[in-house]
Amino acid sequence: MKNNKGRCLTRALVAWIGLFLCMNAQAALEIEITQGVEAGIPIAVVPFEWQGAGLPPHIVSDIIEADLKRSGRFDAIPRGDFLSTPHDHKQVNFKDWRLIKAEALVVGRVQQLGSDQYQVEFRLFDVFKSKQLGGFRYKVPGGSLRKLAHQISDVIYLKLTGERGAFDTRIAYVTVERGSVKQRYLLRVADSDGFGPVTILESNEPILSPSWSPDGQTLAYVSFEKGRSMIFTQRLRDGRRELIAQFQGLNGAPAWSPDGRTLAVVSSREGNPEIYALNLQSKDMRRLTNHLAIDTEPAFSPDGRHIIFTSDRAGRPQIYRMRSDGTSVERLTFEGVYNARASYAADGKRLTLVTNQGSGYRIGVFFIDSKGLLVLTDTTLDESPSFAPNGAMILYATQQGGRGVLSAVSADGRVKQVLRFQKGDVREPAWSPYNRKL
Amino acid sequence: MRNKTSLAIVILLALTLAACGGKKGVKDGEEDGVSTTALDDGSGGLGSELGAAGDLAANNKVYFEYDSAAVTDDSRVLVEAHAQNLLDNPGVTVVLEGHADERGTREYNLALGERRALAVAEIMVAYGVTRDRMQTISYGEERPESLEHNESSWALNRRVVILR
């Protein structure tokens, strides 16, 4: 372990995972791990054997290795150190892996069965116990190989950490491409690692605040396409859109209730930005806040009983909590001059938020019970944080070299990475819930 | 005629104050309700442009302090000049576009931009303009005037634009 430390840290700091998406050159993306971890589980991911014509549509083992690295829980041993390259249990010699201090080993094989049919098998081993921890075989079309790789990463993560992985989830975000005259705003959905982006909405006017429905099937967002802010929902499966809020004044900050029936929204239709509960079926709007100050950025607690929100009713923006019927308002944050855009972790005990303690807008985690605030980042214009559904990572937007990039940080602040797209300003990320069907 | 004269005075005051405020970027010494910025040495040659329709169009931005929707006394004069213009031209309506700088969260800034636009609207209402002649739109931090990430750029972006 000690031996691994230096090597691991150095590698993490210089690691450039040069993964490029072949399908769409425009969407090319690189992930830089900007801050590594000192004590991840040393794991060896052997490149899977390929049995088929030409090149496989996706390199499954590369995707798995990158997933595990990004989580900060693993230290991927460089392939150059490997003493052998097994692809199944019969070929594994545990001594080879103990020598290079691997604690876990992943091997596998991808076979092409038909023109668009692939069989993938993998096995996970505990090197010290010389024991197989798991093994699965799948048959999928080429378009599902990337998704399958993330599912395999989730299996490995669960077996080795005891916690559920969040690799097989998605992220939504907004990309802005500045033209000479006009700007183009793209609302996109990609895999949790930023690959495979699909543009679900294009507009010459601003798009912001994408928010996932609890079933992961629909996004609510704010669009200025009709000249001012309005709230839309859009089903991902078929692109069906619905204009939800076009009241006078601003319409913003949509947030779903856990049962998916209500959207908390911000409207100034009565003269001042207030939070309302909008019943998606009856379209009934119920006002929840009533204060001269700004009340915005609502977010439901996972049990649906509370709504947290940002208010400057005490002079500066701070986080408040009320019951979801608008009663029992209490102030939660007192540390720092600016706390905003808070949202819950699935455990209901932590919030992630934007905090300014006097030296810039950074991402923090707030512990509801102890009222403790942990600042995770050291940049100055961080925005839009959201937890992965397993609560282990936080995705947010920051500025790098004068443009917006997506970043992720582990919930304890130890691992950081930047997702850099080749084009445009990237902003407003939101991590999806579970519940994604294959 | 009297109306025209009063408008001219208001505009002169507004332009003078706006010019002073713009140069310094911050409130000038203001004690016991006495503003020390109202005096001008006259070298600006403002007089020749009085009453021209372009003056208000060119002076249509109200700037704000960080995280504030309070209209400064200097800016209030400018807003009132626009209000007077609306009273003088009954057929005209305006759009009040509220903006914020990039710092902080987008939705909070959307609300802040709305508050700024509403603050300008309130002054116009107090001056006698009816609400149906004004529309407020907040763009939050989405439409910056200056794209740099520094204090002077942010000061330009915290604004309400009065559009005819």
Image: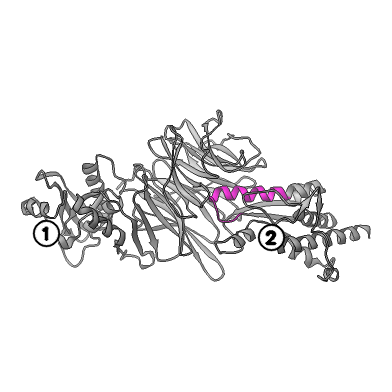
Which chain letter goes with mark 1?
A: A
The quadrant the N terminus of chain B occupies is bottom right
Colour theme: one colour
Which chain letter goes with mark 2?
A: B
Q: Please tell me if label 2 and label 1 are on a single chain.
A: no
Kindly indicate the quadrant of the structure image that contains residue A345: top left
The residue depicted at 30 percent of the width and 62 percent of the height is: A14
What SS does tag 1 mark?
Answer: loop
The residue depicted at 38 percent of the width and 64 percent of the height is: A27
The residue depicted at 23 percent of the width and 58 percent of the height is: A7
Find residue A85 and name its label.
1
Horizontal and vertical percent position of residue A378: 44, 53
Horizontal and vertical percent position of residue A338: 54, 45
Is B109 covered by the magenta stretch? yes
Q: Residue furthest top?
A: A328
Between A121 and B72, the residue placed more toward the observer is B72
When the figure is inspected, residue B130 is found, relative to residue B50, above or below; the finding is: above
In the visual, does A338 lie left or right of A346?
A: right
In the visual, does A17 lie left or right of A431?
A: left
Q: Which residue is mark 2?
A: B25
